[in-house]
Amino acid sequence: MQRRFLIARAALVAAAVLATAGVQAQAPEWKKIRIGVEGAYPPFSEVGADGKLKGFEIDLANALCAQMKAECTLVQQDFDGLIPALQSRKIDAIIASMSITDERKKVIAFSAPYYSVPARFAAKAGTKFDFSPAGLKGKKIGVQRATIHEKFVDATFKQSDIVRYATQDQAFLDLKSGRIDLTLADMVATDLGFIQTPAGKGFELTGPEYNDPKYFGVGVGVGLRKPDEKTLAKKFSDSIAALKANGEFKKLNDKYFKYDISVK
């Protein structure tokens, strides 16, 4: 009887060890991470004249990977294809100025937020607008597809003619050519990526700052698959906190911006 009990107990212990080993084998160590980036949203992410990715979020992605001691591959993808690429496991994370909204949280997980800035319109300098829904009736407003800006404009300016683009740069080009009257985007990206460049001469930020959490969320975070929320999302959150604590985040911030865009 005692022998049978010992054998059974040994079998249970062995099974438990195997089960634990199986779980550990299935849990990724995240030594290699594929990060989806847009590459068309300066100064956060763009392709330089040498064909290489550059920008604040490119530098941040590399700094986060160094902090995590992970080998990372940056995968360029149109913004509206980033979440599908994440869900189909073509990438493991998204670092592309993706705001943390309730709608997106139904589909993917996020790290802690790392930056937050309001949205504003851009238009030809000196042009006067009434920024009420009635005031912008019939006006052509350019927005990037699958963004918080598109959601906000669709919900707020129902009588306007909404023109959608794959990239924000395309909206800026149409604004410059006069095909649209205004475009709504991240205030910093519009200012530094368009208005303060030769292409943006004669254009300005205009209208109010928009930051209603209902549409614009609670800041920008790293996007992850929901099953990875307790592992990879935590690694990114911890690394974001570490970069802020050791001053590396501030160095990157000051390299690109004259003001603090971090989320406190």
Image (cartoon, rainbow, N blue to C red):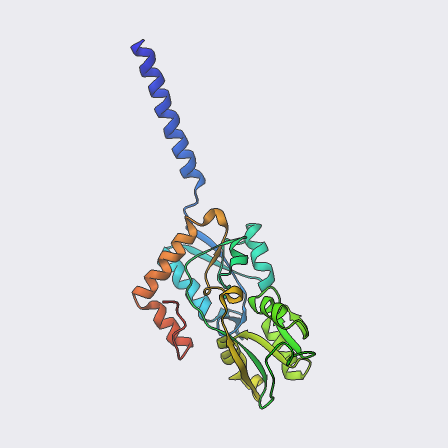
Taking the image as drawn, is residue 56 in sight?
Answer: yes
Q: Is residue 264 left or right of residue 201?
A: left
Q: Residue at x 42, y 36 (%)?
A: 23
**With respect to residue 262, does 5 lie above or below?**
above
Instruction: Pinpoint residue 72: horizontal percent, then vertical percent.
Output: 45, 57
Q: Residue at x 65, y 78 (%)?
A: 134
**Which image quarter holds the C terminus?**
bottom left
Residue 78 appearing in the image:
no
Residue for point 35% across, 71% down: 250
- Residue 235, given in percent of the width and then of the height, sits at 39, 53
In the image: residue 235, left or right of residue 153:
left
Indicate left or right for 196 with 254 as reference.
right
Q: Nearer the viewer, residue 31 or 241?
A: 241
How far across and down, in percent of the image, does residue 257 sit?
42, 77
Furthest residue toward bottom = 126
Q: How many marks?
A: 0
Q: Position of residue 137 (x, y in %)?
A: 68, 78
Name above or below for residue 30 compared with residue 60.
above
| Image vertical order of residue 113 relative to residue 49, above or below | above
